[in-house]
Image: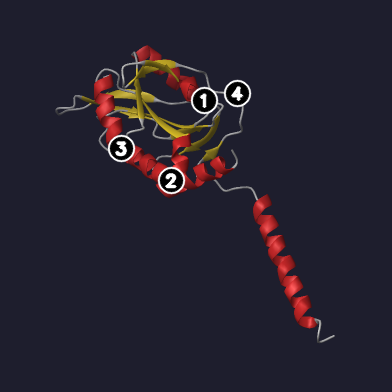
Amino acid sequence: MKRFLPALILGLIGLALVAVFAFQRLRPPVFHGQIMQAGDPVADFTLTAHTGERVRLSDWRGRWVALYFGYTFCPDVCPTTLAQLAQARRQLGAEAEKVQVIMVTVDPERDTPERLAAYVRAFDPTFVGLTGTPAEIAAVASPLGVYFARQEVGGASGYLVDHTASVLLLDPQGRLRLIWPFNTSPEFMAEDLAYFLRRG
C-alpha cells in the first residue's frame, strides 16, 4: 500500500487541479462596468467625421466600438477618459485593431471637424471624432440614455457642457454589451476587452 501512496497523492492533486481549472472556465466573468444583455443593434446613425466625411455607425461593424460622448473644451473628464481608452488599446497589443474608439461631440457649436481631428488624434491616431447639427446629436444621444446640457459660466470659455461621462461598448454586431462608468481604469477596460476578443 505504501508503494502506491505517492501515486495516489499525485493523482488526487491532479484531479484537484482539473477541478479548479474547470471551475474557473465555468465561472461567469467579472466585468468592470454594467453588463448589458445582447439585444438588437443600437439604431444606426449618420454624422460628420473629423475628416469631413459623412459616416454611419454601421461603417464599423465587425469591430468592437467604444462610444463616448464628450467635447474638446471639456476641462477634465473628457481628456481623462480618452487617455484611459488610449492606454487600454495599447495594452491589447495587436488585438487593438479590433477596437475602434469614437467620440461624439456634445458641443457641435465649437467642435468643428478640424478641431475634433486635432483633439482625438492627440490621444490616438486611430480615434474618430464625430459631429453634426444639435438635432442630429440629440437624436443619437437620447436613445442611448446619454444626457448633455449647456451651462453658462464666466471666463473665456463662455459655457461648459454637462454630460454623461460613461463609455458605451458595442459588439461587432452593433449591440450594446457593456457600460463603463467614468474613471474605469485602463487595466480594467483592457481586461474586459480581452475577454470579449477571446470569445470572438
- Could you tell whether 174 is left or right of 118 in the image? right
Question: SS at mark 3?
Answer: helix
Q: Which residue is mark 1?
A: 61
Distance (Cα) linking label 3 and label 2: 16 Å
Q: Image point 73% across, 75% down: which residue?
A: 10
Where does the image place residue 103, in percent across and percent down from the top left? 37, 28
Q: Which badge, 2 or 4, comes first in the chain's sequence?
A: 4
- Residue 97 vs 158, above or below: the answer is below
Q: Are marks 3 and 2 in contact (CB under 8 Å)?
A: no
Distance (Cα) linking label 2 and label 1: 21 Å
Q: Which residue is mark 4?
A: 40
Q: What's the amino acid at mark 1?
A: Arg
Q: Is the C terminus in the top left, top right, bottom left or bottom right quadrant?
A: top right
Q: Which residue is mark 3?
A: 123
Question: SS at mark 4?
Answer: loop
Where does the image place residue 80, in percent across and percent down from the top left? 32, 41
